[in-house]
Amino acid sequence: MEEFLGGRVSSSLPAVIILIPFLAAVVAFFLTRFNRRMGEIFTILSIGVIFIGMLSMYRTVIEGDIIFSRYTFLSLPLSIYFRVDMLSFFLGLLTSFLWFLAAWYSIGYMAHEHAHDRYYLFLLIALGGCMGTILAGDLVGLFLFFEIMAVSSFVLVAHEEHPYAMFASVKYLFMSIAAGLLIFFGIMITYHLAGTVSLDGFGLIREVSTLSFAAFIAFLLGFGVKAGIFPVHIWLPDAHPAAPSPVSALLSGVMIKVGAYGLIRVFYQVYGFEFIRAVGWDKIGLVLATITILLGSAMALLQDDIKRRLAYSSVAQIGYIVLGISLLSEFAFTGAMYHIFTHAFMKGCLFLIAGAIIVQTGERRISHMGGLGLKMPLTMIAFTICAFSMVGIPPFNGFISKWQLALGALDIGQPFYVVLLIVSSLLNAAYYFPIIIAAFFGAPKAEAEVASTVLESEVSVKSNTSQGKLKLEAPLSMLVPIGILAIGCVAFVLMPQNWPLELAKAVVRELFISF
């Protein structure tokens, strides 16, 4: 292994990036009350500034340097510390980009919704929580921002305020609180055993004891709740359908990845992959990943509500990431990192598509989506691209991440997980392809009903006919983000250099060469 030669660069930029969404949230709240459109534009621009700020750190980080901001005032027992390495840069850039598209999409989606001021307020606060968690320089900061993210996203899940939304959001909140307590328990043990909770070091805990194992389980379950792994995934199938679709896209595309991010820090920094492998605790992650993949896929097959099907699919997909983390192989970890990226594009796009379908047709049931490809062709073409990527058909992104995971499994002599990936891909096809076939080749339900009844007038016939063609396509404010994400599911693979894959490899090199 090569030696890590990176240096440290002091900069206030990480702290500024985290501060922007919290300040912008207050401004957006009052601005939206005064003029909704101005508040929306301000929100989008604020998130765009955060994305540009993250992107501006690329050259420094890719050279192996760590950018940090440290402040000693109001420090409690520890200083306030933010840092940007390859892992946090990768996740921060992806988070801000997907948040930008979700805010853009919200213009059309929220047009007929209520409480816009509250929505954009907590949309920005949740972004601040996510970015703070990702850029935190120690476990205490990570925990504090993790809790901010949990509470603010609870409000977003409950936004529509109907009984099911309130039930799902409260369930999510209580499980998030339990997750926070588990993480805090793990942090306390880490500090007791290592004397530090800084993420600058590697292998903070190096002793096998009851306490170190208890901390490992606490971290695994705590971050596992947010990630949505078995058996603490039970909030996810309720929260995703209840939330507004752009929030669902962020929950699945970004926020569950924050849980995966926590697991990466635990496996590769708090303990270190060599320690985890030596004591055999990686097998716990492998078992949970296997069950999560199979359970999520099996449950997705049973769902008729499109957002519940996508939610259970997210459970299965997070299983791939946990599998890649737990295999403790460079190839597999590369697959996990790339799947974090590609799943954000795939599933983020699919939830935005589900929202467009619900807004334009009022229909959530998959069994009633026959002929939808004729009414919303652009939307369903995007759905097809994302579905092909989810299944892992080349040359789509999903194939690359599964290929890397398979190589990782073979690299450590575990062909069982190659079989698992093949079976899960077949299950993905089983619950995505029928939607595509029905949309483009099935008979529209409305037309079948018209054929079996006496039409009231020739005018109604013409109205129904025109609506059966192209009149239901979503507005541009919703279609453009969908199109960008759908194109992203294949464009990077076709380029001369797959930039996200190269970033994923850089993340893996940075963590592996530290040992």
Image (cartoon, rainbow, N blue to C red):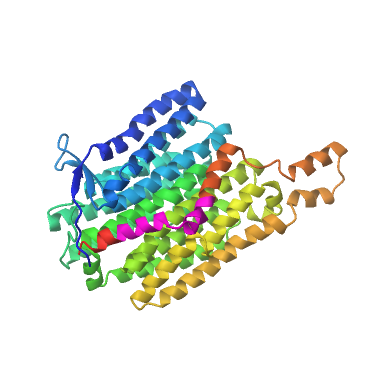
**Image position of 166 with respect to 218: above or below:** above
Query: How far across and down, in percent of the image, does residue 65 sit?
Result: 23, 50
**Image position of 292 with respect to 468: above or below:** below
User: How many numbered discs?
Assistant: 0
Residue sitting at 47 percent across and 21 percent down?
34
Query: How far across and down, in percent of the image, does residue 352 sit?
Result: 54, 46
Magenta stretch in the rendered image? 487-508
Residue 234 in magenta stretch: no
Query: How far across and down, in percent of the image, does residue 177 sit?
Result: 33, 47
Residue placed most toward the observer, 73 or 162: 73
Q: Is 298 positioned to the left or the right of 187 in the image?
A: right
View extreme (top): residue: 34
Residue sitting at 25 percent across and 63 percent down?
512
Residue placed most toward the observer, 284 or 372: 372
Residue sitting at 32 percent across and 48 percent down?
89
Q: Quadrant of residue 212?
A: bottom left
Q: Is 76 positioned to the left or the right of 489 in the image?
A: left
Q: Quadrant of the N terminus?
A: bottom left
